[in-house]
Image (cartoon, rainbow, N blue to C red):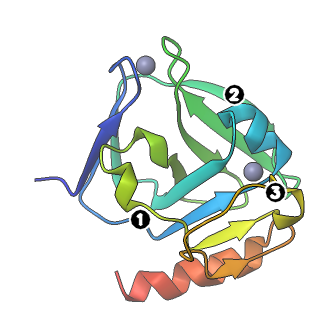
């Protein structure tokens, strides 16, 4: 049985994975805020680690690193499914709202803290905060978590 299952609001896109994410992180940037409505909390997986069924539509933009990001969404219900950033080759960032067990996925780090909604709090789950995109720091965190997976 898959460890994680889920999908979009209308059910056209379904996802499953046998693994836990490498890292769950919150992004407070204004791009994500506009794309996702309030705040982006994403679970990072290797791109082969999540089975995605159903065809996603793609919107491409320039991410905080200055490199392209492809945001995959359902063209029927508009639900954001995952993002793929050129700054994180081979990885996908799954939007945690698509997971059936999204309550279990808590962010351990957050980026673009300078742009955070001032009322947004957490329950102490966030251990590392970065003011900007912190691509290198997050790559290091990913490598560290890979060993304890
Ligand atoms: Zn849908
Ligand atoms: Zn962002």
The total of numbered circles placed on residues is 3
* Residue 44 x/y as whole percent: 51, 61
Kindly identify which residue carries mark 1. 21
Of mark 3 and mark 1, the one earlier in the sequence is 1
Q: Is residue 89 at least partly visible in the picture?
A: yes
Direction front: furthest residue = 119
**Secondary structure under the numbered disc 3 in the rendered image:** loop
Query: Is 62 located above or below residue 129 in the figure?
Result: above
Q: Report if the CB atoms under discs 3 and 1 are less than 8 Å apart.
A: no
* Residue 23 x/y as whole percent: 51, 70
* Residue 104 x/y as whole percent: 36, 60
Q: Nearer the viewer, mark 3 or mark 2?
A: 3
Q: Nearer the viewer, residue 4 or 102?
A: 102
Kindly identify which residue carries mark 3. 116
Q: Residue at x 54, y 59 (%)?
A: 90
- The tag on residue 59 is 2
């Amino acid at each position: 049985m898959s460890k994680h299952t889920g999908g979009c609001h209308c059910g056209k896109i379904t996802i499953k994975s046998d693994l836990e994410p490498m890292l769950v992180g919150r992004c407070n940037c204004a791009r994500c805020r506009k794309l996702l409505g309030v705040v982006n909390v994403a679970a990072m997986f290797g791109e082969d680690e999540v089975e995605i069924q159903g065809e996603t539509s793609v919107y491409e933009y320039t991410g905080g690193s200055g490199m392209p990001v492809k945001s995959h969404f359902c063209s029927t219900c508009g639900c954001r499914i995952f993002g793929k950033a050129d700054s994180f080759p081979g990885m996908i960032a799954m939007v945690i709202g698509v997971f059936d067990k999204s309550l279990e996925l808590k962010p351990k780090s957050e980026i673009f803290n300078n742009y955070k909604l001032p009322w947004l709090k957490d329950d102490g789950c966030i251990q590392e905060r970065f003011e900007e995109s912190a691509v290198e720091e997050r790559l290091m965190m990913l490598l560290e978590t890979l060993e304890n997976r």
